[in-house]
Amino acid sequence: MFTKPIRSILIAALVVLGLATTLFAADLNDVTSVLPKFAIPMREVGDRYQKIYFAAMDGNWGLAFYIR
């Protein structure tokens, strides 16, 4: 009695999930292709902020202003 509607809903859901995973995989590949380009600048920014933080915590404002 309910087998045809359930079967059609299940098929539609599988088609939608298949399309969604394909679109997500394409977006994820785009993101991963760009990320290695940002590895070096992000590391440098992190190192600078860490040095500024510890210089400011020690009260060495001259060093904190020099690093930025």
Image (cartoon, helix red, strand yellow):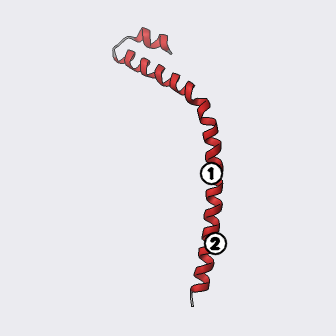
Say which element carries label 2: helix
Picture coordinates of residue 19 (x, y %)? 66, 61
Q: Closer to the camera, 43 or 45?
A: 43
In the image, residue 4 above or below residue 45: below
Asked where in the image residue 50 lies, by quadrant, the reply is top left
In the image, residue 42 above or below residue 23: above
User: How many residues crowd around disc 1 within 10 Å: few (fewer than 14), some, or many (20 or more)?
Assistant: few
Give the residue type at disc 2.
Ala
In the image, residue 30 above or below residue 36: below
Which image quarter is the N terminus in? bottom right
Give the residue type at disc 1.
Ala
Q: Please state which of the two labelled residues, at mark 1 or mark 2, is closer to the viewer.
A: 1
User: Which residue shows up at 59% across the image and 35% down it?
Assistant: 35
Picture coordinates of residue 31 (x, y %)? 62, 41
Q: Which residue is mark 2?
A: 12
Q: Which residue is mark 1?
A: 25
Picture coordinates of residue 42 (x, y %)? 53, 27
User: Which residue shows up at 56% across the image and 29% down it?
Assistant: 39
